[in-house]
Amino acid sequence: MKSKIPVILIFSRLIIGFLIIALSLITIENYQAITVVLLSIGLLTDIFDGIIARHLQISTQKLRRMDSTVDQIFFISVGLAAYIQCPEFFKTNASKIIILAGSEALIYLVSFLRFRKEVATHSIGAKIWTLLLFGTLIQVILQCQSVILFNLCFWVGLLTRAEIIAILFILKTWTNDVPSVFHSIQLRKGKTIKKNKLFNS
């Protein structure tokens, strides 16, 4: 049963994402507080599914690929819910949001063209950006606006997307959990890289 915990956490994040969309479509009391709590739970499942999988020594490529795909669906769901509730924010920042979404789509395109697999680098930079995205979404949900945090999220997002693309071009074969460009260079040279047991498999 323990071996099923990471998968349960991954799919619970998928359910939470769809639930947040559903809540945004109906009028309920304390919508913002409920959504922030659900978003926070979703983030925690994202953190602990990998930690538990590594602890149980079941962190396989299939599981890491599933985790990446569900992460995308989860944050897209939260973004869609935020748009339903706060459309003006998205209209005001449409160009930056489109650029950021385009850069995210580009890394998947590069990964599929190079390796016929979705991206699952789980880089340190991407983890930092996820936290910024989390904070930005909370601010938008609560206030229907974000300036400083959103702009920080935008620029860090572009930098980390660029790093992931660089990693994908440097790697000779598809590899999951590559912490940084430096580590991808080491892998290309055939060297074994040291990974943090807490954050990388």
Image: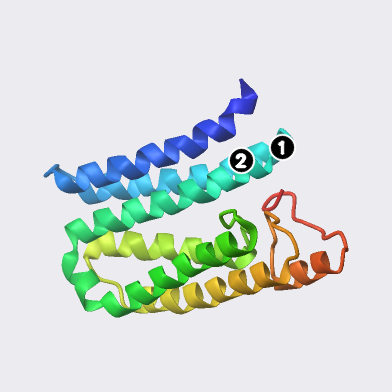
Find numbered disc 1 in the image and state the secondary structure of the residue it sits on: helix
Identity, as a three-letter code, of the amino acid under mark 1: His
**Would you call the spot at circle 2 few (<14 residues within 10 Å), some (14-19), or many (20 or more)?**
some
Tell me the quarter of the picture where residue 159 sits: bottom right
Seen at 29% across and 47% down, the residue is 35
Residue in the foreground of this view, choosing between 161 and 20:
161
Vertical comparison of 169 with 1: above or below? below
On the image, the x and y values in percent for residue 1 come to 61, 20
Percent position of residue 94, x then y: 26, 75
Verify CB contact (< 8 Å) between mark 1 and mark 2: no
Residue 34: image x %, image y %? Answer: 27, 44
The mark total stands at 2
Q: Nearer the viewer, residue 151 or 123?
A: 123
Q: What label sits on residue 55 in the rendered view?
A: 1
Inter-mark Cα distance, 1 to 2? 14 Å
Give x and y (percent) for residue 56: 71, 33
Residue at image mark 2: 63
In the image, taking residue 69 as reference, residue 86 lies left or right, namely: left
